Amino acid sequence: MSEGVILKALSGFYYVDGKDGAPTVACRARGRFRHEKITPLVGDRVVFTALSDGSGMVDEILTRKNQFQRPAVANIDQLVIIASGAVPITDPFLVDRMISLAEWKGCEALVCINKCDLDAAEALYATYRSAGFQTFRVSAETGEGLSALYAAIAGKVSAFTGNSGVGKSSILNALEPGFGLQVGEVSDKLGRGRHTTRHVELLRLNNGGLVADTPGFSSFDIDRLEGCRKDDLQHTFREFAPYLDGCRFVGCAHVKEKGCAVLEALAEGKIAHSRHASYVRLYEQAKEHHDWEDK
């Protein structure tokens, strides 16, 4: 038996990358996984058996640090959220929703603003820097900022995501030219790109990192955060943390309550208005969630 990581899941096969440069093995999952209603995921660390014909069997799934439903991936260290101040212009709410998802799932969120050669997106950059997130300005076209991003994902398992057309595949191709990922053109009429990625796959970097290129925000296009209730949402906005114990009333929603320390910080410019607006929008969605939906 050996240990490895599932790099790709396709048509009932799990492509497991072994340790120390061992070749990738196309594995089936043991029948007991189906009976126990357990599905191996891309990113899973597994124990597998290599068979004499070159194929293999997944014997055991090791403990996951996190998992996502859409896309179906596990053990992500950080979400790299690609945004753009140029065509297409990214709605900050999409970024904020991804950040909250990362915080809820226990992984880091990195904000990467692409196409900075066309628009430096100063306001967007300042918002996430001041909120305490690693924020990068890059250009897949000119190479600006890519070395800093490359260093930030070294040795980590990162999922690249962002609304279609912002340049996820272009950035990955610029970071590792050997990838040769298909790049979609942005529609001038719609101001958005065509999806070019059809499935989730972990790609190995020369710096020891693994990256997942996912099909845009449509993969994370959920009405609410997975399993995150309204009372928990406040903890996914890290800049709220210094003020959460300062509210006048216990159970403050931080939406429009009197004596709310978060709203006072907002009024004083310590919290960005766009971030709080996203919180309110997510809070309203979370209010509509019922416990039975998780069963």
Image (spheres, grey):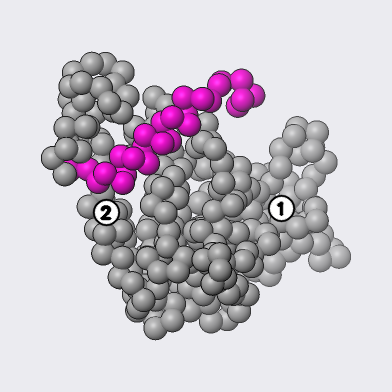
What residue is rendered at 37% in x and 65% in y?
85
Q: Secondary structure at mark 2?
A: helix
Identify the image quadrant of the C terminus. Answer: top right
Find residue 174 and name its label.
none
Magenta stretch contains residue 275? yes
What residue is rendered at 76% in x and 39% in y?
33
x, y percentage for residue 65? 50, 43
Above or below, comparing residue 67 to residue 166 in the picture = above
Q: Main secondary structure of the magenta part?
A: helix
- Residue 256: name its quadrant: top left
What residue is rendered at 64% in x and 53% in y?
42
Instruction: Say which amino acid is labelled 2.
Output: Thr
Q: Residue furthest right?
A: 53
Q: Tell me whether the residue at label 2 lies in contact with that at label 1, contact meaning CB atoms closer than 8 angstroms.
A: no
Residue at which label 1 appears: 48
Horizontal placement of 293 versus 93: left or right? right
Above or below, comparing residue 147 to residue 55 in the picture = below
Instruction: Say which amino acid is labelled 1.
Output: Phe
Find residue 127 and name its label.
2
Mark 2 is surrounded, within 10 Å at the Cα level, by few (under 14), some (14 to 19) or many (20 or more) other residues, namely some
Mark 1 is surrounded, within 10 Å at the Cα level, by few (under 14), some (14 to 19) or many (20 or more) other residues, namely many
Earlier in the chain: of badge 2 and badge 1, it is 1
x, y percentage for residue 90? 43, 59
Q: CA distance from mark 2 to mark 1?
A: 45 Å
Q: Secondary structure at mark 1?
A: strand
Q: Which residues are magenta?
A: 270-295
x, y percentage for residue 131? 26, 49
Can the viewer see residue 166 in this picture? yes
In the foreground, 231 or 253: 253
Horizontal placement of 187 versus 126: left or right? right
